[in-house]
Every structure is written in structure tokens, then in C-alpha cells.
Amino acid sequence: MHLVIPYASAMDPQARAVLADLQLPALDRALADLGAAPRFGGDEYSPALPQERLLAALAGLPDESPPPLAAWFLGASAGSQVWARLTPLHCDVGSDQVTALDPAQLGLDTAASLAFFEALAPLFPDEKGWTRLHVAPGEWFVAHEALAGQETASLDRVIHRNVDAWLPEPRQLLRLQMEAQMTLHGHPLNTAREQAGLRPINSVWIWGCGSAAGHALPADIELDEQLRTAWIAGDWTAWAEAWRLLDARRIAPLLPALAAGTATLSLAGERQALTLRPQPRSWTQRLWQQLRPTRGQAARLLESL
């Protein structure tokens, strides 16, 4: 089994301060026996998150190919089609920037989600080769050959941030996003939401484009996203507590398998992801490792991600 832990680190100064005092004894112990393999990702401005670049490599995709996140989410039902995720958003328009709020706060139920999805249907017409799929509230998908190879920023790069820095570069996707915004502006569905005291849905985010044909994720991957909620919210006290629980409940029981090489652990921060594997060591290196204090190694490693 290969455990992947994303959102393991952050660039926020408050996250750094919390991380400096964070005690993760199981991860410290694992680092005493394991070494880091080559890293994946680039910097905090890369469109794909580090764990997504790691997953792309594990799926055998060429370097820098956009990870087909939508197709992976759909699994076998994605077939060989080229899919993208279409996430409804409320963007807060300020005097100097447009900020995407967390779509989890929209409070969409199934009926409302379907209604908004259908309102955008004319932008993705069947007669022009589009396929549309509503999976759950706010979980919208579209498929078309024109989406192949189109790289866009992952949703979690955008939430609580200025969207201008992350707008899609491909003209077709930018045009679709702008047309969706025009369709939603003043729409009766949004009028009803505002009358009910709810934020309007005034934009969508198109992301995760690609086909997973021939590049399925390995069956032994376990993606543990327990850190995501606090990471997205910027609640670093809650994030640290989630890390402590993850260390005790997921990493500690995995230590024997990690040392034996029958399990693998990968960690992903805001810039990079890495995989920890058993490393051959000489007897002097093993002795030094046993004598060297392990406390604090985890925090130092996470800061580098």
C-alpha cells in the first residue's frame, strides 16, 4: 500500500510558526529509517498541486503532462473520453482583486445543483460533441476532445485567493468561463438565492482536464486528505491537531511495514511532494542514525515542501 498525505505543509507564515513546534513522533521515527526519493512539483505557482504531479508520475504520464483529475475521479465510468471538472463558485469582487470563496460553503442541494448545471447546458451542446455529467451537488463534469492537453490551475490553488493569477491560459477555456459568468449574472436562480440570504453562484472553475486511458492510478494508492479542510480554511491550529491525529493513527501503525519496504509513504506540501523509501546504509551510517536525535526531523522536512 502507498499512503499519500497531501496538504502536509504550507507557505503561510502562521503555518510555518505552527510547524516549527509540531511534534510528530511517528513521522520522526519513519525518517530515521527512510530516505527521500526524487521530488515532484515545482513551486507554489505551479497549476497542479504537488500530490497531483506525484500521482501523474505514478500513473506513468510524461513529465509535465496535466494530471487527468476529472477522469481519475470518475474512475472506470470515464472511459477514454477527455473530461474536465466544472466547479460552481462564488467570487467576491473587491476593489483590487477577485477572490474565489470555498465552494463547500455554497450549501447546494441536489435540486439546486442540477438546476444551475442545466442553466449552463447551452455552453456545452450535445450536437457539438460535449458530454455533461452531474455526479453530486457541485460535482459537475464535461467531456470533449478539445479539452485534451489543456492545463488549468487546480481548484485548491484558487480557493481564498485572487483568481486573476490562476485564470486558464487556453483561450477556449477562458471563453467558456466568461460565458458561464455572463449566463449566471442576473439569472433567476441567483435572484432566488440572494432573496434567501445565500451567496449567488457567479462563476465556475474548469480544471482537471484529460483522459486517463492507459494511465490509471495504481490500485494500492490511498490518498488521505484529513489535513485539507483546515489547510483550505487557513486554520493552522486545527491543521496541527489534524496532523497529530494523522501521525498517531495512520503513520504509527504503518512503521513496521515502512521499515520492511512493504508500504510506501509520500508527503506533499504547497510546492513539492516526495516519497520515503528504505535506503541502503553502511553499518557506520546505521550507527549514526541510531545515535542521532530524531525529534524535529519531520518538521524540518515538511518545511522544505
Image (tube, grey):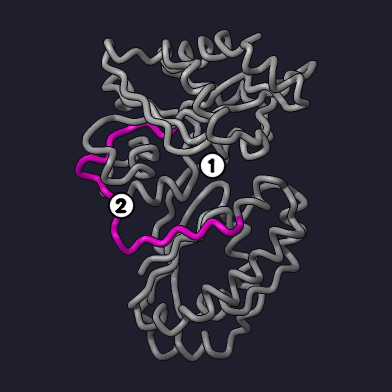
Q: What kind of element bears circle 1? A: loop
Q: What kind of element bears circle 2? A: loop
- Of badges 2 and 1, the one in the foreground is 2
The vertical placement of 95 against 233, above or below, is above
- Residue 187 percent coordinates (x, y): 62, 11
Closest to the observer, 254 or 24: 254
Q: Mark 1 or mark 2, which is nearer the start of the sequence?
A: 1
Q: Is residue 276 shown left or right of residue 77?
A: right
- Residue 281 percent coordinates (x, y): 38, 82
Residue at coordinates 36% horizontally, 25% vertically from top-left? 132
Q: Is residue 90 shown left or right of residue 267?
A: right
Q: Are marks 2 and 1 in contact (CB under 8 Å)?
A: no
Q: Is residue 83 shown left or right of residue 203?
A: left
Which residue is labeled 2 in the image? 217
Residue at coordinates 38% horizontally, 37% vertically from top-left? 70
- Residue 177 percent coordinates (x, y): 51, 16
> Magenta part mainly helix, strand or loop?
loop
Q: Which mark is residue 43?
A: 1
- Residue 47 percent coordinates (x, y): 49, 34
Q: Residues within 10 Å of mark 2 (few under 14, many from 20)?
A: some
Furthest-front residue in view?
111
Q: Quadrant of residue 140?
A: top left
**Which amino acid type is marked by label 1?**
Asp
**Which amino acid type is marked by label 2?**
Leu
Q: Quadrant of the N terminus?
A: bottom left
Magenta-drawn stretch contains 246: no
Q: Which residues are magenta?
A: 207-227
Q: Real-space Cα distance between discs 2 and 1?
A: 24 Å
Closest to the observer, 261 or 223: 223
Residue at coordinates 37% horizontally, 35% vertically from top-left? 66
Magenta-drawn stretch contains 219: yes
